[in-house]
Image (tube, rainbow, N blue to C red):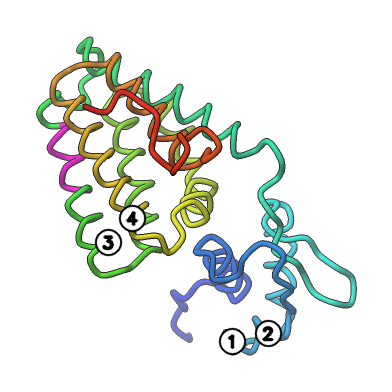
Amino acid sequence: MSPISKDPPAAVRAYLATKELVLSGELPAGHLLSEGDIAERLGMSRTPVREAFLRLQEEELLQLIPKRGAVVAPVPPGEADDVLDAREALETAAVRRLVRGIGTAATLTEAAAGLRAILKRQHDLADAGDLVAFAEADEAFHRAIVADGGNAITTRFYATLADRQRRMNIHALGPNLQHVAIVLREHEALADAVADGDAEYFAELLRSHLDGTHRPERTRPGGARRGPWR
């Protein structure tokens, strides 16, 4: 009897690889790609790539074009605001729950320590110029806030936003190191608010942070952030 392969099927590998190219920003919105391009890159036939493209179209990451391939889909109008509103509601509720002592996820000190550990990784990634990994760590920082609230239902729902968050982060941060530095400072302030048990100040900081990062039209002239930063 031949040994059972532990490698994922080719269609799964094609799906994961293509999805990563989109989420990391290596394939930007509007980029035209073909089944042949991906098949050659991954060393496989076009059939599993075709299956992967269909799956990614269902997830609204690709738009298939008959006989040409697929185009990386832009973020749908209004979706970014929907994601930001959901994030603000869930993260704020999690900190309020944590401060009230509901659940057993973490104490304020433990929660802040976990956030600062992720923040340390973000500093290291920023120094290395690894924007893709920085964006992943950014998502992990905010996901940890929700997890610290100890609500399993909202934690699971927040995880479904991860792909959209990564893509939005890559687009928002760009190659601007000054912008990355601002994000780091604001994450430090958010972690401090958690440590202090100041849920209302956290809510103010979070709104300003999300607006400044993803809604540049809400910044002051010259790019200065609005908000209650101390």
In the picture, the disc for residue 178 is 4
Disc 2 residue crowd, few under 14, some 14–19, many 20+, Cα 10 Å? few
Q: Residue at x 39, y 55 (%)?
A: 135
Residue on which disc 1 sits: 41
Residue 171 place in picture, x, y as percent: 52, 55
Q: Which disc is residue 228 wearing?
A: none
| Residue 65 or residue 13, whichever sits in front | 65
Query: Which comes before the other along the chain, label 1 or label 4?
Result: 1
- Report the magenta residues as a range: 111-118
Q: Secondary structure at mark 4?
A: helix
| Callouts 2 and 1 close, C-beta under 8 Å | yes
Q: Earlier in the sequence, mark 3 or mark 4?
A: 3
CB atoms of marks 2 and 4 within 8 Å:
no
The x and y percentages for residue 186 are 28, 38
**Residue at the spot x=24%, y=18% of the render?**
98
Element type at mark 2: helix
Instruction: Looking at the picture, tell me which residue is in the foreground, 13 or 30.
Output: 30
The residue singled out by tag 2 in the image is 37
Amino acid type assigned to the residue bearing label 1 in the image: Arg
Q: Which type of secondary structure does the marked residue at label 3 adopt?
A: helix
Residue furthest right as drawn: 66
- Contact (Cβ within 8 Å) of mark 3 with mark 1: no
